[in-house]
Image (cartoon, rainbow, N blue to C red):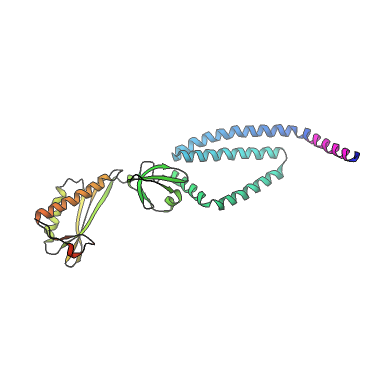
Amino acid sequence: MENWIEIIEAKLMRWWVYLIKMLPNAVLAVLAIVFFIVVAKLVQRVTRRISFRVSKSESITSLLSGIAYIVVVVIGLMTALEILQLEKTVSSLLAGAGIIGLALGFAFQDLTSNFISGAFIAFKRPFEVGHVVETNGFIGKIEEIRLRSTTLRTFAGLHVIIPNKDIFQRPIINHSLTPERKVELEFHIASTVDLRFIVNKIREGLLHGNIDMRDLQIYFSAIEDPRFKIYISFWTKTNTELIEFMQAKHEAILSINKAFVESKIYAVQFPGQPKDEVVPAKG
């Protein structure tokens, strides 16, 4: 029993001596941690300012500044462990962090893809909040851009949350970046009328209609006996809601119909309409 007590006392004494010897190192380690925490806060502020100037995204700014803070703090902890002569602990922590990071990467690869895609969207900025965008079969106004997903509000009032990975990997049409848009119309007319007369009446009707247009083009694109296929196009201004574009298309159809009716032009047929449903225009 006395031997056990002596052994314990000797062990405790060695620990006490070691603690006394390591006391200066412990003080330096604490000071190092405090120093790195202060530096981490400064780096966080600088990173926040720079990232917000570049990305203009609050979510990206928070993410990058948080990562910068954690990296500096981790470096401080590693430095403190080195001062305490715990090199093996540092190696074990690094190895464990690598294994955990690899496992999390495989487990949350879709989430990681969304975050990376969100970061690219924030920096490249193919669209911004308020833009009218068409992607993944939806068209509407961008209301919110986050790291994981983007919220789009359709013209029907529906809020659609689309993962950033799907937006980044698929085509995007940003209507807000296009101040002008081409209106295109195609239909068939009967071969019983003078084609030059048709072109003149269409041009006359469109130019005298209530339409803001430029570069009007009228072509006959095919002969499908007993019909001719006609193609009409012109450029018009468009706004973020696409109302001007739809209004121009609407007015163009009304103007063409009015010109046909006034000129008693017969048998206008649209693509897909059965021939027996083609009714001569009344005049």
Q: Residue 130, percent across and down?
A: 36, 41
What residue is rendered at 45% in x and 48% in y? 164
Work out whether residue 46 or residue 228 is closer to the camera in this orientation and state it.
Answer: 228
Work out whether residue 229 or residue 1 is closer to the camera in this orientation and state it.
Answer: 1
Whether residue 173 is visible to the viewer of this picture, yes or no, is no
What residue is rendered at 85% in x and 36% in y? 9
265 to the left or right of 236: left
* Quarter containing the N terminus: top right
User: Which residue, as the protein is rendered here, is positioned at the far right?
Assistant: 2
Residue 12 counted in the magenta span: yes
25 shown above or below 176:
above
Q: Residue 10, percent across and down?
A: 85, 37
What residue is rendered at 11% in x and 61% in y? 194
18 to the left or right of 92: right
| Res. 67 image quadrant | top right
What residue is rendered at 22% in x and 58% in y? 186
Q: Residue 121, percent across and down?
A: 44, 46
Residue 97 counted in the magenta span: no
82 shown above or below 194:
above
Give the prevailing secondary structure in the magenta stretch: helix
Whether residue 140 is visible to the viewer of this picture, yes or no, is yes
The residue segment tinted magenta is 4-18
| Res. 80 image quadrant | top right
Work out whether residue 238 or residue 247 is closer to the camera in this orientation and state it.
Answer: 247
